[in-house]
Image: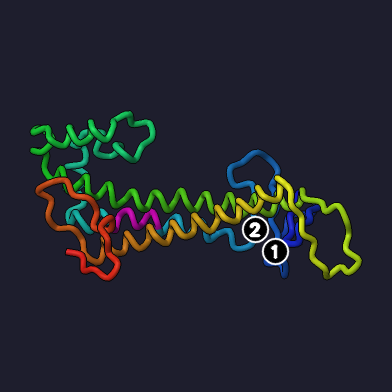
Amino acid sequence: MKTFFQDGTSKEEFYFLGEQPFFYIQELDGNMPDRFVYQGDSIKYKLDNELVALYDKLRDLFFSNTEQYYAELSLMPIFVQSAGQDSECALSAEQFQQYLQIEKFQNIPNFYRHLYLVDCQYYVGTIQNLLIGMEDAFINYYLRITLVRPDATPDNPNDALSIISPEVISISGLIENYFIKAYSILDMLCKIALEMEQPQNSFETYKKQKALKPYGGQELT
């Protein structure tokens, strides 16, 4: 199977079993979603399990009775779970604000509490998407550097070559994209930590998350 190495080379290798003393990415046969494997890739499944558990922790933060939560959730209009979160939801921001003023919605038990929870859980979903994007950039970097071929060979094998081309610029963009997503994940984690450290406890109206307020050196209330 096609195997990509840290030095920018690739070749056909048998499937590696167990740990290897070098970095590699192998492309499995078939058109499957997780067809690229590498040492330590199991961490992405562990992270996803932790993030799924975080959905429940946020739910329990605002709803002490899980059965009551799901009973109330079944009564919620669909826009509560999809507005602003689902790209297929055609509800505009203006329409959303109008819906919040409709009395029959306001009278639903814990209507604003459910909205607040959905907004907080959105952070978790964002982290899951960012992690997928990070892995995609990580894998494609090693795949695409194998396509770059220098025009000359240095006399000293330890010398470095500088190459400027559209392909190299595109590969450099993958590295930038990787770290931008990593920073965004840290930002999302800080927002979640702030929400859990000082959870909102007043839901008479629709409130934005506390983490959206300026918090540099300020006490959240």
Label 2 vs 1, first from the N-terminus: 1
Q: Are marks 2 and 1 in contact (CB under 8 Å)?
A: yes
Q: In terms of secondary structure, where does tag 1 sit?
A: loop
- Magenta stretch encompasses residue 5: no
Using the rendered image of the protein, determine whether residue 1 is visible from the camera's viewpoint.
no
Quadrant hosting residue 61: bottom left
Q: Quadrant of residue 100?
A: top left
Can residue 18 be seen here? The reply is yes
The vertical placement of 98 against 177, above or below, is above
Instruction: Measure the C-alpha gap from mark 2 to mark 1.
Output: 8 Å
Q: Is residue 40 above or below residue 166?
A: below
* Region of the chain picked out in magenta, as a range: 51-57
What number is the disc on residue 23? 1
Residue drawn where x is 23% and y is 33% of the image: 94
Q: Residue 48: x percent and y percent?
A: 45, 55
- Residue type of the residue flagged with mark 1: Phe
Mark 1 burial class by Cα count in 10 Å: few <14, some 14-19, many 20+: few
- As drawn, the residue found furthest toward the top would be 90
Disc 2 marks which amino acid? Tyr
Tell me the tag on residue 180. none
Other-residue count near label 2 (Cα within 10 Å), few / some / many at <14 / 14–19 / ≥20: some
Front-most of residues 195 and 67:
195
How would you classify the magenta stretch by its main secondary structure? helix
Residue 38 is marked as 2
- Name the residue rendered at 58%, 59% in the picture: 41
Q: Indicate the quadrant containing the C terminus: top left, top right, bottom left or bottom right.
A: bottom left
Residue 60 lies in quadrant: bottom left
